[in-house]
Image: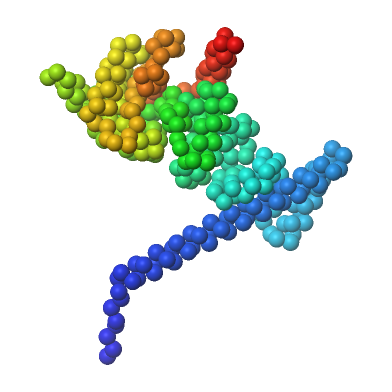
Amino acid sequence: MSKSKSVNISLLSEIRTLIESAKQRVAANVNAELSLLYWNIGKRINNDVLKNERAEYGKQIVASLAEQLTKEYGKGWSKQQLKQCMWFAKIFTDERIGYTVCNQLTWSHIRTIIPIEDSLKRDFYIEMCKMEHWSVRTLRERIDSMLYERTAISKKPELTIKHDLSLLSKENKLTPDMVFKDPYFLDFLGLKNLFSENDLENAILAELQQFIIELGTDFAFLSRQKRITIDNDDYYLDLLFFHRRLKRLVAIELKLGEFKPEYKAQMEVYLRYLKKHESVAGEKAPIGLILCSGKKQELVELLELDKSGIRIAEYLTELPPKELLEEKLTKAIQLAKNKLEHIKNKSL
């Protein structure tokens, strides 16, 4: 009887890797070509519609094209699909930008993003999607959770937003305003009614993976109740993280009630200690994040926390109705931009 020959495990593993890598590249190339096809179809239809002055022509040509293409090529060429192709080409009029988007996102990602009317908001999701390699499901969850509206960058002037998005797109550089949010959604902790700061901290550690997802995928957990000894007195920082892209330590303090001015001094001490004793060569200055159940806007502004590298944000352990949350965030963004415009006008 012939004996079966043993397989070289190392060789088999390398060949498997080659096969899987090739399959991924083929899938990516196919997706890019399909997305580019949809962009070209959308551009061609848009150009044809523009040439005809009759208002009803656009609807008629889309309907007839959908019917004929479905007969010839089967499913996937509905009126809705053609309208999405047209919208895709209308949004990304520059062929180079359209080509870049096609090569970096799947058609399912693109279809999810193109309904967003605000161009800055749309570019934010495109860049974050590329950087963090979001699945389509994750992208939809981020949009539904109003990530852009909660991120600090949304409250900045338009030029600042464009500058930070350009930095991320062209140089892969992330600014703190693209990272930190307000509020943070901590509903996954399951905390109801009365709970202590210790309960909050323990719940976060028990759901650390979910907490990091809410913070952002580049956060790496380092320590809880980090002991800081100054002049023989011990202080304890609630949570210590490191952000890989920002290359900074991030100190997080958890507070049950509203923000109080003394929290600033406490965090400043922690940040200066971390900079002196914990930071290593190549890292930027540590940043502090104080999570509170509430804050008074004027008090926060007067303390000029940004100058100390401190961020204040609310956390929600129970989410309000989406309509109420959307209204609150929209007002907060508009208020911040109005104040920036007022400051600008005063300086002129």
**Residue ID at (44%, 66%):** 19
Quadrant for the N terminus, please. Answer: bottom left
Position of 247 with respect to 111 (left or right) is left
Q: Position of residue 98 (x, y in %)?
A: 64, 46
Give the vertical position of 17 relative to 276 (above or below).
Answer: below
Q: Which residue is outermost to the bottom?
A: 1
Residue 77 visible, this angle: yes
**Residue ID at (39%, 18%):** 307
**Residue ID at (45%, 62%):** 21
What scheme was used to colour the molecule?
rainbow
Residue 205 visible, this angle: no
Q: Position of residue 298 (x, y in %)?
A: 45, 9
Give the vertical position of 92 relative to 145 (above or below).
Answer: below
Position of 49 with respect to 20 (left or right) is right
Q: Determine the image quadrant of residue 161.
A: top right
Quadrant for the C terminus, please. Answer: top right
**Front position in the image: 44 or 184:** 44
Q: Which residue is outermost to the left?
A: 232
**Front position in the image: 60 or 181:** 181
Q: Position of residue 290 (x, y in %)?
A: 34, 21
Task: Count the labels in the image.
Answer: 0
Q: Determine the image quadrant of residue 279.
A: top left
Q: Position of residue 310 (x, y in %)?
A: 36, 21
Give the vertical position of 176 relative to 25 (above or below).
Answer: above
Position of 71 with respect to 297 (left or right) is right
